[in-house]
Amino acid sequence: MIKVLIVDDDKLVRKGISSAMPWNEFNMEVVGEASNGAKALDFLKSQPVDLMLTDLAMPVMSGIELMHAARQLYPELHIVVLTLHQDFDYIQEALRLGAIDYIAKVQLEKEQFEHVLHRIHTRINGLTNTKIKMPSQNAINVHYRNVYALVSLDRKSEHTWPMELTAHEDEIRWEVERNSWMWAVPQYEEDQLFHQLKESLNQVPQSTLLVLSDVQERTWSQIKNWIMNYTETSLFYAYNPSDQVIPVSMKEGDIFSKEPQDEDIDRIKQSWFQTLWTHHDSYYNQLIDQFKSLRLHKGQLMGLLYSIVMEWNHLFAQTTLGRISMIHSFESWFEVEEWIKQTAAGIRKTDEQTSYSPEIIDAVKKAVMIVQHDLEQAYTASGLSQQLNISRSYFSQCFKDLMGKTFNEYSRFIRVEKSKEYLLNTNNTIFWIAERVGYTDEKYFSRIFRELTGLLPSEYRQLGRGNK
């Protein structure tokens, strides 16, 4: 009988799970409940538990903290995470700590209870059977030349894994983490294992087969952790659906991402806002190389792309240069590069609908960026056209056609828009704000502000704060 402990700070949730689930049908029995992690640890000390269902967000001790403690004290304990919202980053941390599955509480309304328990029961049985063939994590590998890891970048879905590949008694089969398994067999069986795993790639979405060498004289824990770290960093950039077998060596150094420098981020943003990369392969490849050289984690890369899209749309969405759409999700650099290609094609198509060359469009974009990033300077169309090596009259014509406003109209507009932020979000004086947006005369600034908004700066501040 599998003994179950339910941990959740909501009493109704605990009672609902305890009473509604068909535990007996799956040889399970609820032996206790706890309202937080600390009480759960006390219960685990008092009597044996095989399976713990725990919420993540709890007072006193969170589910993540409970898992840290329980995995050290009770390594054979199976843990399933309960979560109200499917926050994947939080769930992923729980899975890395050893949770065998997670259940979104909304599933308990949408799915059959039997399905949920069947999935958990099957997973426990699979792990129990696997443990018979697994060595100790601290044992040193002296017999196996290579380790084969089948990894799916899709961590959210439940996949069917090719578990029974060989029948040799010396086969090692180990679940590294959710949707990531590794195998090792004697050398004379490696070819058979390799071909079977390679054929199974079609069964597992977004999968890659890692052939890991230089694994001898390493502990299995070291091998497992190396695969996990490689999956989180280098595999993100190495994955390619047209070449799913990747030979790697444990001697490869520095597989971790470094913290990006501000100047590197700024260089990428500057390159993005230049037109030429969307029109010429050499500039496109240079931008791609700049992105990849940073080796950003997925979250960091998403943040960078989001900031680029937001700034682009802030500057150009209401102009003939058009807006761009954000990539909503990705599991690999391959998908990001596909999005960049599509975005480049969209920008190029929009540019081609104008009568101007890429060089002229690039010059207008540079002028916009110069003014946006240094509002304290009183730039003029004459000065910028000279800096960009274009005649003043032609620059003014191009700017109005592409941006929908004359240069002077645009300059006043963005300065007033920035001053609105200062008025609502700071207590600085009107004179201070005027200087920060390029006006040395407070009265002149106030007159321009009223022309564009219908209100004096002080009136705008008072009205805006009164509505909050």
Image (tube, rainbow, N blue to C red):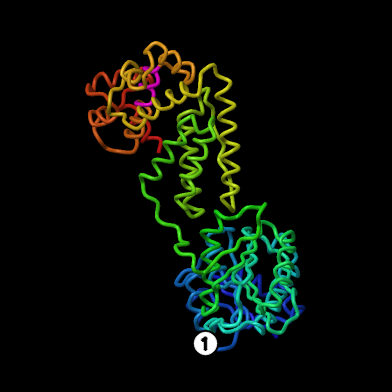
The C terminus lies in quadrant: top left
- Residue 197: within the magenta? no
- Residue 413: within the magenta? yes
Q: Position of residue 319 (x, y in %)?
A: 50, 23
Q: Looking at the image, which is closer to me, 111 or 254?
A: 254
Instruction: Report the magenta residues as a range.
Output: 407-415
Q: Looking at the image, which is closer to me, 257 or 190?
A: 190
For label 1, the crowd category at 10 Å Cα-Cα, with few meaning under 14, some 14 to 19 and many 20 or more, is: few
Q: Which residue is mark 1?
A: 45
Point 45% across, 26% down: residue: 362
Is residue 351 left or right of 257 when viewed as pictured?
right
Q: Position of residue 272 (x, y in %)?
A: 47, 36
The residue under label 1 is which amino acid type? Lys
Q: Position of residue 444 (x, y in %)?
A: 26, 18
User: In this rendering, does residue 432 appear at all?
Assistant: yes
State which quadrant residue 77 falls in. Answer: bottom right
Point 44% across, 18% down: residue: 399
Is residue 108 left or right of 8 when viewed as pictured?
right
Q: Looking at the image, which is closer to me, 462 or 386?
A: 386
* Above/below status of 300 relative to 353: below
The N terminus lies in quadrant: bottom right
